[in-house]
Image: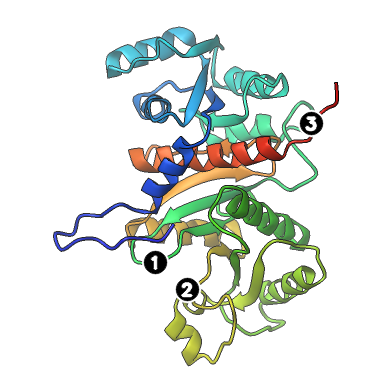
Amino acid sequence: MSVTAADSSGARSPSKYDRLIVAAQAVPAARTIVVHPCDETSLRGVTDSAAAGIILPVLVGPEKKIRDTASKSGLDISNFELVDAAHSEEAAAKGVELIHAAKGEMLMKGSLHTDELMRSVTAKVGGLRTDRRISHVFVMDVPAYAETLFVTDAAINIFPDLDAKRDIIQNAIDLYTQAGFGRSPRVAILSAVETVTGKIPSTIEAAALCKMADRGQITGGVLDGPLAFDNAIDMEAARIKGIKSKVAGRAQILLVPDLEAGNMLAKNLAYFAKADSAGIVLGARVPVVLTSRADTARARMASCAVAALYAHARRQHAPTVAA
């Protein structure tokens, strides 16, 4: 999914997200449980993605409020299944129950707060946990960068330890390969510097993660770190520092040291570099689409597209049960 430069007028030409949406339209629409879509922004993201053939929505929330929102916003939800829930907390719980009942293969956030949804997803009893740590990936379309860029984890794990970072990396690699972005993604493990020093713990963890990959504890990608942000994404910066690496200067996945650093990086890319960012939660029983009110319509659809492609790949590789 290579980027196409903007034309002379400054308008953005067909992008990585456009190609992503086209790819998602080529596979069967994913049945998606949408939790509490009670404002125009969240409901429009659903109807746009459904109209594009990416998802088949099941709307969970206060039925009257959802119908009123659709009517006021001029959105047609007449073909969507609705499951009534009194409020956002009940909608999140019912959404998770529907996933357990095999009524959907994706979960999508509506207008409730992220922590309300994630409490139900991560609940030890009745949640959607697996043996893998749950993590978040921003799939970013940065106009000035040739690669689709994954930033992880900038939304779920605040101060991940070494084992958590192993799962965060593996989740991102699995998404990259299974959703069709390519094979063997280049993973840069970010820190403030590119040398290992006891004064900066993230550099030690970066070195350990690279050795874990060497020993097969992380598979499917090419890892290097610690790398500072500049020499992770810029070939000239890597050359000046004398870094010889398959990853440096052309990373596809950026593992950040902690949530705070990741959130600032993602927002810098969004507001300074004019990047679009799609959001998806991994490591649960199904992919979870996280959108925000600040997302563009294209970014919301791209979030659905990424999750739908991943859900399709998981469906294709699901074990069959003999009759």
Q: Amino acid at mark 1?
A: Tyr
Mark 3 → mark 1, Cα distance in angstroms: 41 Å
Q: Looking at the image, which residue is at 40% across and 66% down? A: 146
* Residue at 36 percent of width and 47 percent of height: 18
The answer to whether residue 41 is left or right of residue 83 is left
Residue pointed to by mark 3:
320
Helix, strand or loop under label 1: loop
Instruction: Establish if 14 lies above or below 81.
Output: below
Q: Are marks 3 and 1 in contact (CB under 8 Å)?
A: no
Task: Establish if 277 lies above or below 284.
Answer: below
Residue type marked 3:
Thr
Which mark is nearer the camera, 3 or 1? Answer: 3
Whether residue 283 is situated above or below residue 223 in the rendered picture: above
Q: Can the viewer see residue 66 in this picture?
A: yes
The reply to whether the C-beta atoms of the residues labelled 3 and 2 are less than 8 Å apart is no
Q: Look at mark 1 in the image and give the residue it sits on.
A: 145
Residue at coordinates 64% horizontally, 18% vertically from top-left?
94
Instruction: Find disc 2 in the rendering and name its residue.
Output: 233
The residue lying at 72 percent from left, 76 percent from top is 207
Q: Earlier in the sequence, mark 3 or mark 1?
A: 1
N-term mark: 2 or 1? 1
**Above or below — where is 122 with respect to 225?**
above
Disc 2 marks which amino acid?
Ile
